[in-house]
Amino acid sequence: MKYPRLLPLRTAVMLPFVVLLVVTLGIIAAAQHSSNQRMLDEMSTRLLHSYADNITTELNAFLFAPFAANNAMRDSIERFGLHTQDSLEKLDGYLLNMYKDYREEFPQISVISYGTEDGLYLGYRINDDDSISLMLKDKRTDMSLNIYKGLELTPTPSFQYEGYDPTIRPWYVPAATYLSSKWSSIYTNADEKQEITITGSSPVFKDDKFAGVLATDIKLNHINRFLADHSISYSGLTYIMDHQGRLIASSKDGYGMINDGQRRHAKESNNAVIAATGAHIESLLGAPLYDVQEFDLIIDEKRFFNLLVPYKDSHGLNWYILVSISEKALLGEVPAIQRAGLASVAVFAVIGLLTALMLISRLTQPVIEIANAARRLADGSWEYQIKSNVRLKETAMLTSAFRDMSARLQHSFFTLRKQVLYDSLTELFSREGLLDEMRKPSLKKQYSALYLLDLNAFRSINDSLGHLTGDRLLVAIARRLKARLPTDVTLARIGGDEFAVFHPDLATPAATEEFARALVDMFIQPFRIYDDEVVIQISIGLVSGTLKPNTEVEWLRNASLALSKAKFQESSRISSFEPFMADETMAKTRLTTEMSRAIENHEFCNFYQPVVSLKDGCIHGAEALVRWQSPSRGLVPPGSFIPLAEENGMIVDIGRQVLLKACQDTQQNIDSGEWPQDFSMHVNLSVRQLMQSDFVEQLKDVIRQTEISPQSLTLEITESRLASNNSQMITVLHQIRRLGVKIAIDDFGTGYSSLAYLNQLPFNKVKIDRSFISDLNDDAQRRNIVSAIINMTKGFGAEIVAEGVETPAQAALLNKLGCHNAQGFLYSKPLPLSQWPTLKVNIGRISPYNDQM
Ligand code: C2E
Ligand code: CA
Ligand code: CA
């Protein structure tokens, strides 16, 4: 059997642990995660701010360099009047020296130059190979801008720019406009290198008059390098943008390129982090952005913490610095270590759970074993052993209790089985035991035979000698049979006085008969019980053949059918089963079914046979005789169904219908004057009807209902059925008599009733059985018997009716002997009421001939 909806013990025990474990791990993971977040937030804020502070300070110093240089140079130019008409010759050496000095201190300075209102220009530029180029425009260069390889004015400069006007250059304009030190915008150099530059420019005055601009350049590349050098050492990123979101410099993606005169915005960067943060900041730039902004973004599925700080200086810079760092960089190996820790806890937990599971499996194993053993027990197997390798107190208790229980169960089962299989009195097999033996596979192949032995008149032995003697007799019979029968024969007592012998191996049908006779012979010798010698005879029903599986019960039934035949056989007390016997039983069953339907459908009807006075030939009574008008069988005589109806009790219903109809018909005919007032209706009554507890009530009902006078009714009861001395029956008969209804003893002379018994019966009439009348011719002995019956009846003060009168001679003789009432074919066969002879009849006028039954 499966229990799909039930939780196994193992699971029930394990489940809470598993749940607890999962929840604990979950809580740990969640707590770890939230503490990580808090730590991240704090760390990122602190780190970003400290870095931003740092870089701002450094940048201040970095960007102050040009103005420091400018201030020193301006001072000298103004004080020493180094700016002369048309020529910057005086300034040459000085500026170069200054440049050299500052280069040492501020490597970010790429160009130092001086442009004048007169359009003169002197500059020194550092080249990639660390050499210094002179850039000059004055009268020495015929007012064209010449750029030289070195510091010498060679005839062939490396670059020549005709019509160069410093005053319109981006580095010149701010100082010239505001007349104070200012940053230029970001622009491309006019020289052959075309580098992107920002210049710190300062005005120079001559005689308090604005004369020119000192310009010190920083290439944006330098700022990039500065940012890269100062960037957070591990995977951090820094960049600078202006207030329009245009990229100025960055630690990762260089400066903002100029495309078609337009500088690139941070959001257009190739670097994903710069692009994303740039876009974010640009969305903020619309709103006033005075203070620091801290934000984090998920970029390419990685989290970045960012800090934006405004960067302003006294020379007109209005920049923003953005510092960014990834979560991964921030946390480093921490998450991985935490994950590994959590994983190892999980692994330990799983190992623990598996161990617990194994342990529980082993612990629950005895329970499962016992359940299996119990199931085997239920299926009838006692052999199953409980295997258990777990020795624990509770399971040992359970196992031992189960073993005790199954041992006891086994004991009581076998005791019970013994009781079922054996007959306790004779110790032979019982009916069940016999069937069990017959079912054994080894017996099935041979030609075998089953004999049922019935002891004739065993009941009278029991009645006369007592039950104890009866039991002794049965034991003695068992012993004798056991002693004389071959050992392979199975012997059983299957009923009170019924024995069964199963012979598994008989060669031929002839041998079967022979064995039956041998069984009969075993009973010739009387049995000695105490001092009595008891002679007993048996009837045998047998069935033989090859016993097929599952036909044992059928064999027993067939043998029983043969036995009932044997009991009623006059010739031989041995009867072998033949299929017709089963057919008879079938026919009986079918008849029973049809009869019960017939009762419901009122298919039974009454025929009436006149009772005639022999003195005057008048009809003064009738006997109601039932007929069955069956749709399938036609008109059925009572002999064909009354015995079966008596057997199965249906006679009660049939009898009731007959009685009612007879009384109705009688009263109607008396009322209509067809029949005389003192007409006597005889109705046959079965003892089974009489023995009903409410029969008298039923009778009263019929009388009330039909308004028949009780004196007109006589109930006939067969003498042989009255014979057993039954006090209840006698009481009922008296009650009937008291109602005024008469009682007739039917078939008188065949029941062998004692006079003493007859004396107790309250009868009014006696009907001499037809067998006496048919023999009643000139045989003097017969005549004497009838005469004796008539006289005896008169002695009881009862009327007498002769049945079955067929000849006028019989009628005459009966009349002479003093019997004046008769019934018989001589006068009329039983007729339906519609054919009832209407005329008053005498002996001569009632026709003996009639087609009806
Ligand atoms: P019974 O009570 O002895 O009825 C008389 C039987 O003798 C009737 O047979 C009747 O037809 C037959 N009989 C009458 N005169 C003659 C004659 O001159 N010669 C011959 N050979 N027979 C004659 P029936 O009608 O076949 O009834 C047979 C038996 O069925 C009855 O015997 C009675 O025992 C039983 N029976 C009939 N009707 C009923 C009934 O309503 N209730 C009960 N319990 N038994 C009934
Ligand atoms: Ca009768
Ligand atoms: Ca009769």
Image (cartoon, grey):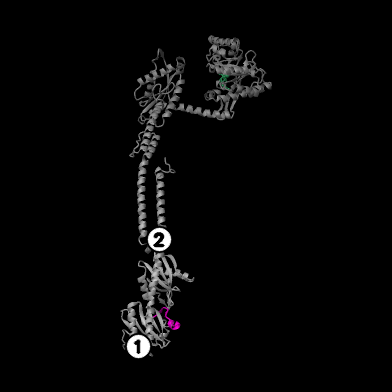
Badge 1 density bin: few <14, some 14–19, many ≥20, Cα 10 Å: some
Disc 1 element: helix
Q: Secondary structure at mark 2?
A: helix
Residue 824 appears in the rendering = no
Residue 611 vertical placement versus 83 (above, below): above
Stretch in magenta: 174-188
Q: Quadrant of residue 743?
A: top right
Measure the alpha-carbon separation of dots 2 and 1. Answer: 63 Å
Q: Quadrant of residue 749?
A: top right
Q: Residues within 10 Å of mark 2 (few under 14, many from 20)?
A: some
Q: Could you say where residue 178 lies in the image, as x and y percent from the top left?
A: 45, 82
Q: Amino acid at mark 2?
A: Met
Image point (36%, 50%), residue name: 350
Q: Quadrant of the C terminus?
A: top right
Residue annotated with mark 2: 39
Q: Residue 496: x and y, percent?
A: 44, 21
